[in-house]
Image: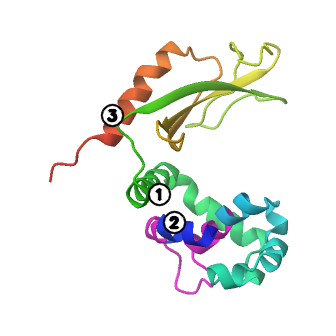
Amino acid sequence: MVAGFCSRLRIRELVDAACPVRDVAELTHGQVIEVLVANRLTSPAPLVHVREWAHAWAVGEAFGVEPGLLNDDRIGRALDAIAPHLDHLAGSVGLAMIEAFGVEVTRLHWDLTSISLQGDYKQAEPGFAAPKFGHPKDRRPDLKQIQAGLAVSSDGAIPLFHRSYDGGAGEVGQVIPAMQALQRLAARNRC
């Protein structure tokens, strides 16, 4: 069932178009990511155990991927390859979902929440949300946090857009830029 949905969403095709591999590769990044989607949905396993999961769950038959090739290094290379393209891939798969299943997107629901973090976070990598003290929803002001915003469809709460924010950023200042980003994303392409 998962293989059928992945096919309808064109996950393999879209990942392979954005992240091509060398001709000598035994698996494409799209094949690996498609299998990881199935793993996350059926029986999430740590990366070092995906190969065993793939043998037990007939991944070879369902996806045409030899389970023995799914070692943690190969999975890590696929994840590294798609990392710079996540927004593009999420948008492309989202568009495929809208087209394949007729998801209603004329109205979206936006929610912002905080995620409290344990540990020491001195400095975030450039381009990523910075853990900071703020006003967490779980009322744990002793912990640093990041914030996450999610837009979902009004006809079934299907996630369509997301953004992460610094932990100390004010919520009011995040809503307008998020709506503007959604507006740019949904703008008509006038060829």
The residue at the far front in this view is: 155
Residue 14 shows in the view: yes
**Looking at the image, is mark 1 or mark 2 earlier in the sequence?**
2
Which mark, residue 183? 3
User: Please, is residue 146 above or below residue 14 in the view?
Assistant: above
Q: Nearer the viewer, residue 125 or 108?
A: 108
Asked which secondary structure carries label 1, the reply is helix
Residue 19 shows in the view: no
Asked which secondary structure carries label 2, the reply is helix
The residue carrying mark 1 is 93
Q: Position of residue 182 (x, y in %)?
A: 38, 35
Pointer 1 with pointer 2, Cβ within 8 A: yes
The residue at the far left in this view is: 191
Mark 1 crowd level (few <14, some 14–19, many ≥20, 10 Å Cα): many
Mark 3 crowd level (few <14, some 14–19, many ≥20, 10 Å Cα): few
Pointer 1 with pointer 3, Cβ within 8 A: no
* Amino acid type indicated by mark 2: Ile
The residue carrying mark 2 is 11
**Looking at the image, is mark 2 or mark 3 earlier in the sequence?**
2
Which quarter of the rendering shows the C terminus? Answer: bottom left
**Looking at the image, is mark 1 or mark 3 earlier in the sequence?**
1
Verify whether residue 76 appears in magenta.
Answer: no
Q: Position of residue 65 (x, y in %)?
A: 66, 82
Which quarter of the rendering shows the N terminus? Answer: bottom right
Q: Nearer the viewer, residue 158 or 95?
A: 158
* Amino acid type indicated by mark 3: Gln
* Amino acid type indicated by mark 1: Val
For image coordinates 84% across by 66% down, the residue present is 48
User: Please, is residue 85 above or below residue 29 in the view?
Assistant: above
User: Please, is residue 163 above or below residue 3 in the view?
Assistant: above
Magenta range is 13-36
